[in-house]
Image (tube, rainbow, N blue to C red):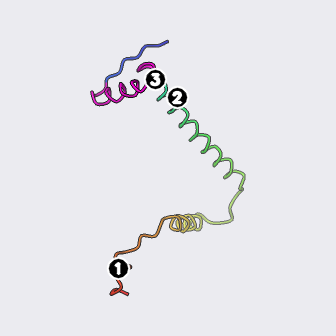
């Protein structure tokens, strides 16, 4: 197994030692290996999601819409997904 030396601030080292101290990890190396495995899993999950989106897009075929039409539709869909922010005037009965 390869040996790796890293430098970190004392505060981070205390965090790592505290994680090992919980008993979940036998030593610092196990903690870092677990972090790397989790990061690898997250990256693989992101790639899997992107592949699914690409497959779905390719399967949908070509659009009859123009690029400006597609952009406007995307803008409208994005606006519908953003929660409405009520202005302070909406709550004031004197402003109605």
| Part of the protein shown in magenta | 8-31
Q: Which mark is residue 22?
A: none
Within-10-Å neighbours for mark 2: few <14, some 14–19, many 20+: few
What is the x, y in percent for residue 65?
65, 66
The residue singled out by tag 2 in the image is: 37
The residue singled out by tag 1 in the image is: 89
Up/down of 58 relative to 47, above or below: below
Q: Which mark is residue 25?
A: 3
What is the x, y in percent for residue 68?
56, 66
Q: Are marks 3 and 1 in contact (CB under 8 Å)?
A: no
Residue depicted at x 56% and y 41%: 46
Question: Majority secondary structure of the magenta segment?
Answer: helix
Q: Is residue 70 left or right of residue 39?
A: right
Q: Of the residues under marks 3 and 1, which one precedes in the sequence?
A: 3
Q: Of the residues under marks 3 and 2, which one precedes in the sequence?
A: 3
Is 37 part of what is drawn in magenta? no
Within-10-Å neighbours for mark 1: few <14, some 14–19, many 20+: few
Count of picture labels? 3
What is the x, y in percent for residue 94?
33, 87
For the residues marked 3 and 2, what is the alpha-carbon distance in whole angstroms?
A: 14 Å
On the image, which quarter does residue 6 sit in? top left
- Secondary element at tag 3: loop
- Secondary element at tag 1: helix
Up/down of 59 relative to 63, above or below: above
């Amino acid at each position: 197994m390869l040996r790796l030396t890293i430098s970190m601030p004392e505060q981070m080292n205390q965090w790592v030692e505290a994680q090992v101290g919980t008993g979940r990890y036998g030593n610092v190396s196990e903690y870092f290996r677990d972090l790397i495995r989790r990061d690898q899993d997250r990256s693989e999950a992101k790639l899997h999601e992107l592949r699914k989106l690409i497959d779905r897009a390719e399967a949908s075929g070509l659009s009859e819409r123009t690029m400006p039409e597609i952009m406007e539709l995307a803008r409208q869909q994005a606006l519908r997904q953003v929660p409405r922010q009520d202005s302070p005037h909406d709550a004031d009965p004197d402003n109605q």
